[in-house]
Image (tube, rainbow, N blue to C red):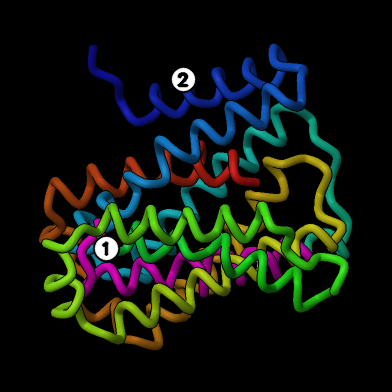
Amino acid sequence: MYFSVSQLIIFLMSNTLAFQKNITSQRGMILMSFAAIYIIWGSTYLAVRFAVVSISPFLLSSFRFLFAGSILLLIAKLTKASLPNKHEIKNASIIGLLLLVTGNGGVIWASQFVPSSITALVITIEPIWVVLILWIKSKENKPSAIIWIGMFLGIIGIITLIGPSNYAQIAGVHPIGIIAIVLSSLSWAIGSVYSMQLTLPKNAFTSTGIQMFTASISMFIIASLLGEWEHFNPNEIKFTSITAFMYLVLFGSLVGFTSYA
């Protein structure tokens, strides 16, 4: 069965609304969200790799978050979500900058130089950043023995997944790309911790939509400063890049990022 883009958007919207209505258990929502993150987010790094082949990274991000943010705010309107106040909008915008602009944007830029498999593995240091940031913020958040064991096992897991055969590949990867991914994961961790302390719009669709609109505008400015518009030609965009872009909007942003939020 073949779907047009509009049909697919309607399908996702209706299922998202049904999902919210039918699953009342917070535990169930969390488990389903984790499942979406585990399955979808790992694949987005490969999608980004295909997309940046013929679409500049910051233009790609600007368009992606513009489309996804518009759909989320439309869903919020259809569900009659309460309007956020200025303070909530400001806070959501700050989180959008940390998570999507410096966090996600840095990863997408680095994807021009770093294989998606290596990107996905380097990104997994983010939980370590979160633990360290919380510890720095307060001694009460000092990691327990079980947390240290968990992080140690996680590092061993990363080393195992990379495997000896890939170490030479990592050594040949552009170092600036690796540094950008590491710093992006740090920014994402800071944004994640900071978001727990801020008053954000009560509706997840509204909050996430504002974050994406902030990111879209910021990415547009960055793309303009870097001269990406000068090299942008819609006729030269490859079909694989268009397909990857649609996947990033519909699944990476609408499902994956909303689940994270």
Q: Which residue is mark 2?
A: 11
* 83 shown above or below 76: below
Q: Nearer the viewer, residue 186 or 62?
A: 186
Amino acid carrying label 2: it is: Phe
| Numbered tag placed on residue 118 in the rendering | 1
Q: Which residue occupies 64% across, 33% down?
A: 75
**Secondary structure mostly taken by the magenta-highlighted segment of the chain:** helix
From the viewer's perspective, is 77 left or right of 242? right
Residue 49, image x and y in percent? 23, 58
Q: Nearer the viewer, residue 12 or 180?
A: 180
* 156 shown above or below 223: above
What residue range appears in magenta?
91-117
From the viewer's perspective, is 32 left or right of 8? right
Q: Determine whether the residue tagged by mark 2 lies in a helix, strand or loop.
A: helix
Q: Nearer the viewer, residue 102 or 30?
A: 30
Task: Evaluate if marks 2 and 1 touch, with contact meaning CB atoms under 8 Å apart.
Answer: no
**Is 112 included in the stretch rendered in magenta?**
yes
- Quarter of the image for the N terminus: give it: top left
* 9 shown above or below 82: above
Residue 168, image x and y in percent? 12, 73
Q: Which residue occupies 67% across, 41% down?
A: 205
Q: Which residue occupies 34% across, 57% down?
A: 120
* 31 shown above or below 134: above
From the viewer's perspective, is 181 left or right of 102? left
Mark 1: few/some/many CA within 10 Å (<14, 14-19, 20+): some
The first of marks 2 and 1 along the sequence is 2
Comparing labels 2 and 1, the label whose residue is closer to the camera: 1
Location of residue 59 (image quadrant): bottom left
Location of residue 237 (image quadrant): bottom left
Asked if residue 250 shows in the view, the reply is: no
Q: Determine whether the residue tagged by mark 1 lies in a helix, strand or loop.
A: helix
